[in-house]
Image (cartoon, grey):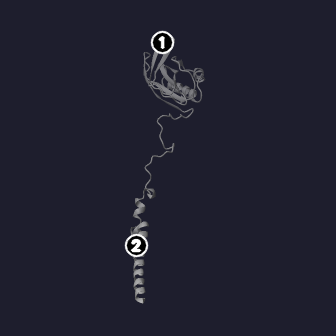
Amino acid sequence: MTTTLRRSGARTRTLAGLLGGLALAASLTACGGDDGGDDVASDPSASSTPSSTPSTDPAQTPSSTTTPEPDTGSSSRGPIEVTGSAGVKDATLMTATDAGGEASSMAFAVDTDQARADFASQLEGTLGDEVSQEAAQQQAAAPGTTPYAAIVGVGCEPPTSVAVDAGEAGFQVTAELPKSNMQCFAAMTFVVVFSVPDA
């Protein structure tokens, strides 16, 4: 009886040791084993690599359908191509946002302080003053010429060129506008300033 108990106990300890070793091996495998966590690295939810899913933040998503709102009152100036029968070779295109005015094909002489003030009075913001300064500078740079100004357009896109023609009533300015259906939040005013030699 004593021998049977010993054998039975020996078998029980051997079996218990084997089961304990298997349990330990299973728990080490579940925790990633001895190599530091291969299972963690292969788990996509635990990966430290940034997600390749596109951002849904509207601030980071570019929009191709909305035209940015221009700064109110912003202005610019630069040369513009000139054609036409008047023989004008150079002209300056001046642009401002929300400057008002109405487009007209008629150019107005802006050769005196009063004439410049009259022309500027139809424009809002600083564009009127800037046009007056440009006209005065052109007159000072080329004595024997008369500066003229015309509002050639009010819209979203600037003219690509202007034609200055001499007519019975004076100089007429026709703007070549780009073909576009673009819509803008605030209209821009386009003024052309040019000088013509005195007769």
Q: Residues within 10 Å of mark 2 (few under 14, many from 20)?
A: few
- 8 over 143 or under it: above or below: below
Q: Residue furthest bottom?
A: 2
In depth, the one of 97 and 111 nearer the eye is: 97
Instruction: Inspect this view and state whether residue 130 appears.
Output: yes
Residue nearer the viewer, 74 or 90: 74
Residue beneath label 1, please? 167
Q: Residue at x 45, y 15 (%)?
A: 165
Q: How far is mark 1 from mark 2, CA to CA?
A: 106 Å
Task: Compare marks 1 and 2 and give the one earlier in the sequence.
Answer: 2
Question: Residue at the location (41% across, 69% down)?
Answer: 26
The numbered mark at residue 22 is: 2
Label 1 crowd bin: few (<14), some (14–19), many (20+), radius 10 Å: few
Q: In the structure shown, which secondary structural element does the residue marked by tag 1 occupy? A: strand
Q: Residue 143: give its label.
A: none
Looking at the image, which is closer to me, 65 or 44? Answer: 44
- Estimate the x, y position of residue 127 in percent, counting from the top left: 56, 28
Res. 197 in view: no
**Percent position of residue 88, x then y:** 44, 20
Look at discs 1 and 2 and give the one toward the viewer: 2
Look at the image and tell me in which quarter the N terminus lies. Answer: bottom left
Residue type at mark 1?
Answer: Gly
